[in-house]
Amino acid sequence: MQIFIDESGNLGKSGRFFVISALAPNNPKRIKNIIKRCCVKFRKPEVLDEIKGKILTFSRKQEILQKLNKKDDFQCHYVVADKKYLYPELLADNNICFNYLASHLLKPILKGANENIQIIMDNRSMKVASKNFLKDYIKLKCLTRWEVSNKISFEYRDSKDVKNLQAIHLIANVVYGKYTYEKEHLYGLIDNKFVHRIKFPRNKFHT
């Protein structure tokens, strides 16, 4: 089983929300082909080798999400943090904060899996030390707290080369837009695909 992870927002002072999203496809090739065809279709007048939420027009985002929603063999998950209510000590270290939030996202996914898991992330968003820290942190949680015995591996790839990473990048962007700008339409197009929607911290989350 493959899980593709990407984020939207930042853990710095700008913006209120930070999102980490996960895509779990039964058949990764189906998602890959949708994104690949859209890259070709949207190529003119500009060269488009990679789907990015920030550069796509509303109508193009809508078209991709509608195509994705027609497929019934994948799930999405996300954790969204309201930084206003996070402990300052947690926000003071971006790596620790990211890993902590990622663990909340991954816990229900990994505990519900009955096969080995390959977690694939964009290598442009994390430093080498951070990558190893996350990998060790999640594996430790699996062994000591979550009762997950399946093999967990991590792979860091350039999203330009992995269409499924581009898909979850767009989905993370749409989730971020829902909470930051209260943009509901695009989120609604993919709403039925979300299995876990984790809001953090739960007791103080912005409504």
Image: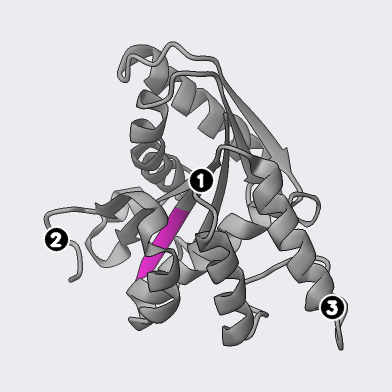
Q: How many marks?
A: 3
Observer-side mark, 3 or 2, equals 3
> Can residue 29 be seen?
yes
| Between marks 3 and 1 in the image, the one whose residue lies nearer the viewer | 1
* Secondary structure state at the residue bearing disc 2: loop
Residue 58, above or below 37: below
**Which sits in the foreground, 85 or 6?**
6
> Tags 3 and 2 in contact by the CB under 8 Å rule?
no
Q: Percent x, y for residue 52? A: 67, 70
* Gap in angstroms between the C-alphas marked 2 and 1: 31 Å
**Image-quadrant location for residue 40:** bottom right
Which residue: 46% across, 27% down?
137
> How far across and down, in percent of the image, does residue 53 sit?
60, 73
In the displayed structure, 46 sits above or below 69; it is below
Q: Residue at x 38, y 42 (%)?
A: 105
Report whether residue 127 is seen: no
Q: Earlier in the sequence, mark 3 or mark 2?
A: 3
Range covered by the magenta-colored residues: 16-20
Of pointers 3 and 1, the one earlier in the residue sequence: 3
Amino acid type assigned to the residue bearing label 1 in the image: Phe
Query: What is the crowding at mark 1: few (fewer than 14 residues within 10 Å), some, or many (at least 20)?
Result: some
Mark positioned earlier in the residue sequence (2 or 1): 1
Q: CA distance from mark 3 to mark 2?
A: 43 Å
Q: Nearer the viewer, residue 177 or 187?
A: 187
Furthest residue toward left: 203
Residue at point 43% right, 75% down?
A: 177
